[in-house]
Image: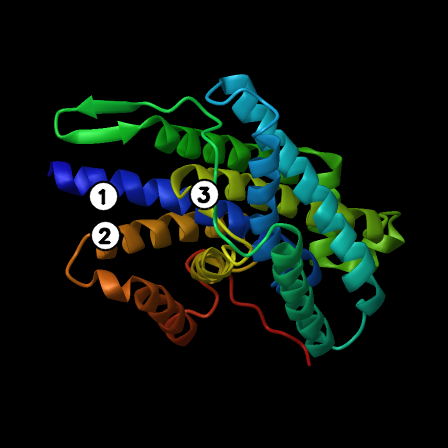
Amino acid sequence: MSEFLQQLLNGLSLGAIYALIALGYTMVYGVLRFINFAHADVFMVGSFIGYYAGKLVPEGTLWGGFSVLLAAMLGCALLGMSIERLAYRPLRGSPTLNVLITAIGVSLLLEYSGQVFFGAAPRTFPPIFPSQNFQFGSLTLSSNQIAVIVVAALLMLALQFIVHRTKIGTAMRAVSLNPRAAQLVGINNDVVISFTFGLGSALAGAGGILYAMNYPSIDPLMGVMPGLKAFVAAILGGIGNIRGAALGGLLLGTVETFVSGSQWSTYKDAIAFGILIIILLFRPAGLLGKFTVEKV
């Protein structure tokens, strides 16, 4: 029983990180109806912002850790808005394939620019938060795991508040429902879309810090696999559905952790993509998504 609880705790910690990244995918898709494949590399940039910011604050302090977290979120928000303004906005109204190819190009640009500016060698992420292990019988709980779960939960609640209780959130839902009608009632679609990219990228930056805290080796290609799995999580929960993205991330992280602790540990990545295939075959809208008829 204790082993089950330990794996469940580890899975929720990993799943919370996947959920934060998946939220960025699902928010952009909900507003613009395309997948921002550069999002995973914004996650990587967040880790490196945290790496350099962590050298400027005292290690192992709460205020230092939260300062690094806020710096990464702000830096990634600015990066996300810049990507939208320079790469995606000129293509608005173009065929989806053009935007998709551009997203892949931006992703590769960030990855290999990261190798130029940060270096290709892995780096050790500094301990920005106080680190301590707590023992409850045979169950081991680390302060980093607590920080990941608490911070991720607070950010998800803040996102729910922004989307459902603020004017900009109402505008985001209006643009998602009907961009042309939203524009007719006075909503500035450019501002809303830019804000959506900034908000999603800020969550990716937070995910990058939380991931690096638990897996403290970072490199410019570190976002590839977590980004793909977060994409699977977004599909699993229902792409375009915020609660679905959070649920998908938690489920995928939990399943992956249990598989990692079994005799099939070498297949943990294959199982994640196997889940994607099964979902696309039997429930393409995802667990919480709604089936819609698309006009051609």
Residue 255: quarter of image: bottom left
| Label number found at residue 258 | 2
The residue shown at (61%, 57%) is 115
| Label number found at residue 74 | none
Residue 121: x and y in percent read: 51, 53
Mark 2 and mark 1: Cα distance apart in space: 6 Å
Nearer to me, 266 or 166: 266
279 horizontally vs 208: left or right: left
Q: Which residue is the site of mark 3?
A: 211
Q: Are marks 2 and 1 in contact (CB under 8 Å)?
A: yes
Mark 1 and mark 3: Cα distance apart in space: 17 Å
Residue 8: x and y in percent read: 25, 42
The mark that comes first in sequence, 1 or 3, is: 1
Which amino acid, mark 3? Tyr
| Label number found at residue 7 | 1
Give the SS element for disc 3. helix
